[in-house]
Amino acid sequence: MSDYTRANTDGATHFTQRDARSTGDADKVVVGAHFDAEYEAIVTAIATKYDSNDISSQAQAEGLTLDTVLLTPHTLNDVLIDNAGILKDLQALLVAGFSAADAVLGWDDSAGAAIGFTFTDGLAFGDGVITLEHLGFENLEDPGDFDRLLFWDATTDSLQWLQPFHGIETAGTQLRLADHAADVAVPITIVDGVFDIDLTSLTTLEGNALAATDLFYVNNGGVSEAIEYQGLGFIVQTGMGTQTLAAADMNTVMEFTATSTLTLPLNATTALPIGACILLNMKHATQELTITAAASVTLVSIHHPAGAAAASDTLVAGGGAVLIKTAADVWMLSGDITT
C-alpha cells in the first residue's frame, strides 16, 4: 500500500512552476507524458488503499483471523463486549488498578463479570506460591513421623494438627479405639475397635448399700450383659437325676422328680468353689433324694453335727434343702432331711 506523491518537484511535472518560465521555454510546455506519469502514481495509490468495503464485519472482527480488513473503534468495542464481556472486564480491571497489586483473576458468575481476588481476601503470595491464608494452611508444618488429624481451631480461627490422644489411634483411613488389655485400673478390653468389659483382673469387687435396681455387669457366654441386683437369682435346673455335683450346678436350684442320688465329689477330682450354694428340691409326693459324700468328703448336717466322712442324708418327698461347700472337702446340708 503506497501514498500518492508528485512524481517530480523540480518542475518537470510540477506544473505550477512551469507558469513562471519564459514563453518559448521547452520546460514551459506540458505534454501528455507528464500527465500519464502523475495519473499512474495516483492510480497506484488509490488501488493499494483501503476503501469503505474493507471495513470488517462484527463476525470478521470476532474471528480474529483476517489481516485484509480494517477494524473500527466501534467494532473493537463490540469485540471487547463479546465472550460475556470478559475482554472489556479485563480492560476495566486494568484501568481500575488491578495490575497495581498482586491478584488472582476469577469469574463472578452472579455479577457476570471478571473479578480480581486480591491477597486481602484470604490469599497469601510469596516465593511464587499462593496459599489460603485465612484457613491457616501456611501455618501447618510437616507433622513428622506421627499420625495427625487436621481440625479447625475456632479459638485461633485456623487449621491445626491434632495428635490422637491416649486410647485413640489411626488404622489406615480410620480413627478407632486403640487395642487395650484389661487391667485393674481399666477393666476393659478393646480389640480392633470393639470393646468389652473384663473384670477378671479385679482383685476385689465390693457393693455397699445396694438397691434392687443397681446393675451388675456379667459375662453371659462371651456377651457382656447388665443385670439388676434383684435379678441375681438362682438358675433353676429341672428334670435332675442321679449324678455327681459339677461346676454347672453351683448357685442353682436343682429340681428332682424321681428317686435319685446326688454325690458330693472329692475336691481333688472336681474342684468346686468354696462358698458355692445349691438349693435342692424334691418335687415328688413319695420319691426321695439321697445326698451322699464321696470317700474322704465330710458331710455336716443336723444328723452329723461334727461332720462325718462319706456320710449320707435323705431329702424327703416334697422337701427342700440347702447345700453349701464350706471347705475343700466339707459340705453343709440343712433342710427337710432324714438319715
Image (tube, rainbow, N blue to C red):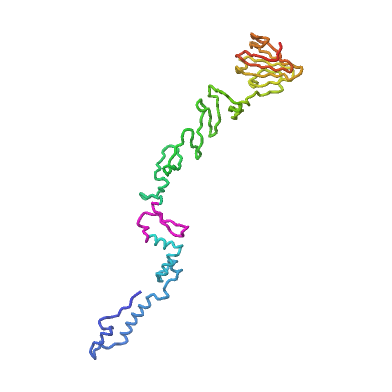
Q: Position of residue 172 (x, y in %)?
A: 50, 39
Of residues 106 and 339, the one drawn nearer to the viewer in this rendering: 339
On whether residue 225 falls in the magenta region, the answer is no
Residue at the far bottom in the pictured view? 24
Residue occupying the point 51% across, 34% down = 177
| Residue 299 sits above or below residue 58 on the image | above
The image quarter containing residue 205 is top right
Residue nearer the viewer, 136 or 206 = 206
Res 221 seen here: no
Query: Looking at the image, is 228 positioned above or below residue 127?
Result: above
Nearest the camera: 318 or 241?
Answer: 318
Depth check: give the residue in front, 76 or 233.
233
Residue 283 on image: x %, y %: 73, 20
Residue 111: x percent and y percent? 46, 59
Residue found farthest to the right: 286
Residue drawn at x 30%, y 87% is 31
Residue at the far left: name it.
22
Q: Magenta span has 98? A: yes
Q: How many marks?
A: 0
**Quadrant of the drawing holding the C terminus:** top right
**Magenta segment:** 95-120
* 49 to 205, vertically: above or below: below
| Horizontal arrangement in the rendering, residue 12 relative to residue 45 (left or right) | left
- Mark yes or no: residue 172 visible: yes
For residue 63, side relative to residue 40 (left or right) = right
The residue at 54%/22% (across/down) is: 204
Q: Residue 87, percent across and down?
A: 42, 62
Give the position of the N terminus as an image quadrant.
Answer: bottom left
Residue 108: which quarter of the image? bottom left
In this rendering, would 166 be left or right of 235? left
Q: Residue 158 is drawn in which quadrant?
A: top left
